[in-house]
Structure formats: C-alpha cells, structure tokens
Image (tube, grey):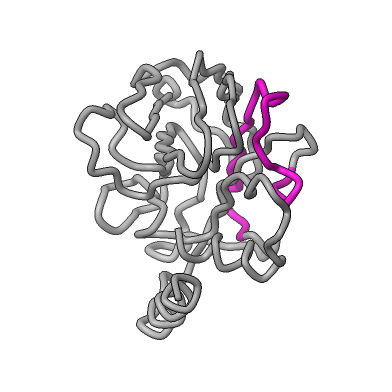
Amino acid sequence: MKKSLLLLGVIAALAIGAPAYSQYVYLDANNDGVCTLGDNLTSATTAIAVWLNTNHDANGTTKTCAANAGQPLDIFSYDLVVHQSGTGSVTFNSYTNAASGFTQVNALTVAGADAGVGYGAPLGGNLSPGLYKLGTFNVAVTGTPVLNFIGVSSNISIPSPVTGFGSSCDASDFANTVTLSIDFTDNCGSAPGTDTKSTTWGKIKQLYH
C-alpha cells in the first residue's frame, strides 16, 4: 500500500509540473563515486561521501539556470540535511569537507534522527558548474539503517535549514539557494540493507525525496 501511495505521489508531483532545471545530489557509501543499490550501510561502513552535480540531472542531461540562462549553475556554498530510518542507527562522528576553499558555516549537528552541516566559500570563491564531492560523513553504523536527504528541514535544532547549494543562479523560495524538493528533485540516499528493491524503486526514490 505504501509503495502504491508513494508512486501516486510521484505521478501527481510530475503532473503538476517541475522546475525546468534539475541537479543531482547523492550519497556514496562504497567509494565508487556513484549511487547504486550497492550503497547499503553495514557495520563495516565508516565513511559516507556526498556528491553534487550542479548542472546535470541523474540521467546526465545538461541543465542551465531556468530563471536566467545567463546565470551559471556555479556553487559558493552548500547545506546538507539527512534523515536516518530503518533498523539500527548511524552515529555521526564528524564531517570532512572536500569542496576546495570552503570553510564551515554550520557545524555538524545531530538532533534526533536528523543530521545537518553547512560550508561556504570566501567572496569570489565560486566553483564552476559541474560534479563535486562535497565531503564525507565519518560514521559508525549498527544494524542496517537507511539515510535519505531532507529538502527543507522542520527540525529547528539543525542550523542548516535545507539541502541545497548557493549559486549565482536565481532560485525559487530561497534567494540564490538552489534547494532540493523546491528547485530540483533528483537525489539518491543509501540503499536498503537487503537488496530487494528494483532499479525502478531507486529512480522513484530520487524523484520523490
């Protein structure tokens, strides 16, 4: 029943209409640089990388700034908010930034099942549009939990309010902050501990979250 409702929700969202541009943010738990059903969390997992493609969607299609084609989809800051569910837990020990020249704006904060962190570049330190490894969550895992991104967080204990990135491109609700679930939909969290889902489920997950 849940899957049916989820699929209906995805179809309804697509029918209403999505922004004309999209980006892709994803987790990588097995260090292969992509998000697949192999990215499940186990007790052997000690690091979970976060990647962002600022100007391509999950299918690799090139995107431009919808608000103004002359504005680049570059990046000068980012915020991440993730939520854990399933069996077991993820303990967030630290976060290591990988974006060149970026410094911490919002410290890694864990509140309940959510964790968030934010980094920014100095003035004029924008990175060109493209694919970037933003950083790595250093973790300890018990059981088989699942991590997914939160677009706009309602957890007031997390300083980072959204999953998104600062850009020269105008955005919708948050000025110059291209935000998951508002300005784009493509994302990929960790896979279930038991590989019983089809690749179709993986694509639905990217579109829905």
Left or right position of 179 against 51: left
Question: Residue placed at 49% from the left, 38% from the top?
Answer: 75
Give x and y (percent) for residue 60. Answer: 70, 61
Q: Is residue 2 above or below residue 185?
A: below
Dividing the picture into quarters, in which one does residue 200 lie?
A: bottom right
Does the magenta-highlighted stretch encompass residue 37? yes
Q: Is residue 62 magenta?
A: no
User: Left of 182 or right of it: where is 138?
Assistant: right
Assign the magenta stretch its main secondary structure.
Answer: loop
In the image, the segment drawn in magenta is 34-57
Whether 60 is drawn above or below 39: the answer is below
Residue displayed at 73% across by 45% down? 34
Examine the rendered structure and indicate whether residue 59 appears above or below residue 99. Answer: below
Q: Is residue 197 left or right of residue 120?
A: right
Residue 94 vertical position relative to residue 206 in the rendered view, above or below: above
- What is the x, y in percent for residue 182? 35, 59
Looking at the rendered image, the quarter that the C terminus falls into is bottom left
Q: Residue at x 63, y 49 (%)?
A: 192
Q: Looking at the image, can residue 129 be seen?
A: no
Residue 100: image location, x then y, percent: 59, 21
* Residue 152 x %, y %: 31, 48
Asked whether residue 59 is in view, the answer is: yes
> Image point 51% across, 61% down: which residue?
22
> Which residue extends farthest right?
32
Query: Which residue is the extreme one toward the bottom?
Result: 15
